[in-house]
Image (tube, rainbow, N blue to C red):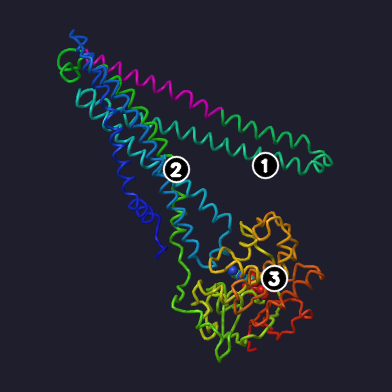
Amino acid sequence: MNHERGLKSVVFKIISSSKGLTLAMVFIIAGAIVTALFPPLVLERIVNLLIAPEQVPLNLPLAYFGLLAISGLFESGQNVMITKFGQKVTRGLRSEMCAKLQYLPVAYFTEHEPGKITSRFVNDVDAVDSMFTNGIISMFADAFKVLSILAVIFYKSKGLGLIMILITPLIFVMTRQFQKQILQAQLANRIAISKVNNHVPETIGNIRMIHTLFRQKYMEQKYDDYIEESYRATDKSNLYDSIYSPIVIFISACIIASMMILAALGGQVQQFFGITVGTAVAMIAYVSRVFEPIESIGMEIQNIQSAVAGIKRINEFLQEPERKKTDSSITNRELNPGNGPFIHFDHVSFSYDQEKTLENPIFNDLCFTVASGEAVTIAGRTGAGKSTIFRLLLGMYSPDEGRVLINGVDADKIPDTQKRKLFGYVEQSFHQVAGTVTDQISLFDPEISFTQVEDAAKLVGLHESILALAKGYDTEAEHAAFSQGQFQLLSIARAVAASPKILLLDEITANLDSDTEGRVLEALKRASQGRTVISISHRLHENTLNQRIIQIGNQTKEVI
Ligand SMILES: Nc1ncnc2c1ncn2[C@@H]1O[C@H](COP(=O)(O)OP(=O)(O)OP(=O)(O)O)[C@@H](O)[C@H]1O
């Protein structure tokens, strides 16, 4: 499956997978636009009959109320459908982005802060949602509403239609100006409020220093300035808000009054503007209906504008290059140790920064082998590249030159499906997942049975402690009061649960006291039986597993 495509094609895919919903939405929007035009036309007929004077058939007022009700229903339906459609797009987009995450190379996660990635999923997707629910679709619906009203007015009276066509863009420009001013004031208010919110904890946190250095007046003044800023901004926003409506009412009254005056004039003007009393009533109804969608279009444009940046960022995220393809034909059997070296770093050169590969590589022509069942320790100063060796072995990165081989197979070609049966990776600290104690060990892997989970816990000596918990293996991990050492044992159990051939141990006793360290090392000895073990250690004098040591770190040709 290709996940390297832009937002546009993802949205098209979501839309085409929900054709029924899209068609229903288009139908309901069209219904809302058309049905809103009818009630004033019926009113026109009623008034004309009353003026005639003629009997008004009962079905006309009934039709008027019926049409108003249908139009209201379509209007509500439109809102429901647009929201539903927006939710559908948002859900589809989030799941597409989540799938994309799985295909990104490890480097992406080191180069981008977690907060920023999360913000793509939360704020930026919300921006797309608001673009659909309160932006582009409603904007088209409102634009059609305005156009259809103008068309009916033009059809009824050319002169009045022309006046409306000339005035509508002016009303739109005025509305946008008001909205921009209100938005600016609201933004200024938000900034002022965030300053106020920061100021309070800052004052509390530094209260002793403020007293000692006699800065009370200064802090008080700053607080007053911020709330004054917020007060002014709110005041401005309220002012624009409160004068907009009377202005609109005044303009609409002026339009209606001038229409009526022109319609009442005689001669040539009468021909151009002339309307019946009934039509005049209908025109009044139409004019008052045209302002609402114009105001909405302004807000929708604003929503679209503020969504643009988020949409751009999501687009970039979706188009991020994905990690190298693995070879799905590689089977577990191919990774069973054979005659040659089990692990082979074959003249490996590597640098994280591709542009500086030649100037400053982490490894330059690194060579070493590890036999099956052997236990080795990688040693070297901080930053020498010990963890990088693990990352290359796990296939997270590819060497710039040379090959990293496991039983003759390139490590970066090994598919994810084989990794757990091949590697058990124990890190310095335990990373808990949401779930039970069993889940901590199995990591929700359906191929790991409960017996395997239990065996792993027994192997590391945790079985009894787990049974002592309120719900044993079914205890939620957050309610299991494990010590740091027990968490590290859990980490080893997790690593060996799938019976991997290779154990990678990254400074696993670094954060433990000597007593706990002893227990963990004992568990480790048991877990290492029959496996190839590579450890990273700073404390070589404590190399209790009596392993061969591979020293790295002089950045020159290294053959070990
Ligand atoms: N994702 C990364 N992107 C760029 N540089 C990195 C990345 N990870 C590590 N490095 C750099 O590569 C070098 C080797 O890092 P590595 O973590 O392999 O060292 P280490 O020997 O395990 O260090 P330590 O003993 O401190 O854990 C360091 O200079 C580190 O800053």
- The dominant secondary structure in magenta is helix
- Distance, label 3 to label 1, CA atoms, is 51 Å
Say if 187 sits above or below 1 in the image.
Answer: above
Mark positioned earlier in the residue sequence (3 or 2): 2
Q: Amino acid at mark 1?
A: Asn
Q: Are marks 3 and 1 in contact (CB under 8 Å)?
A: no
Counting other residues with Cα less than 10 Å from the Cα at mark 1, is it few (<14), some (14-19), or many (20 or more)? few
Mark 1 vs mark 2: give the one in front.
2
- Quick one: which residue is furthest to the right in this view? 212
Instruction: State ligand 1's quadrant.
Output: bottom right
The magenta segment is: 235-264
- Percent coordinates x, y for residue 219 in the rendering: 74, 37
Name the residue beneath numbered marker 3.
458
Counting other residues with Cα less than 10 Å from the Cα at mark 2, is it few (<14), some (14-19), or many (20 or more)? many
Name the element at disc 1. helix
Q: Amino acid at mark 3?
A: Lys
Say if 452 sits above or below 244 in the image.
Answer: below
Residue 508: mark in rendering: none
- Distance, label 1 to label 2, CA atoms, is 28 Å
Say if 119 sits above or below 559 in the image.
Answer: above
| Residue drawn where x is 27% and y is 20% of the image | 64
Mark 3 vs mark 2: give the one in front.
3
- Percent coordinates x, y for residue 287 in the rendering: 31, 23
Give the quarter of the figure containing the C terminus: bottom right
Mark positioned earlier in the residue sequence (1 or 2): 2
Name the residue beneath numbered marker 2.
130
Q: Amino acid at mark 2?
A: Ser
Residue 198: mark in rendering: 1
Question: Residue 475 is drawn in which quadrant?
Answer: bottom right
Q: Is residue 136 magenta?
A: no
Name the element at disc 3. helix
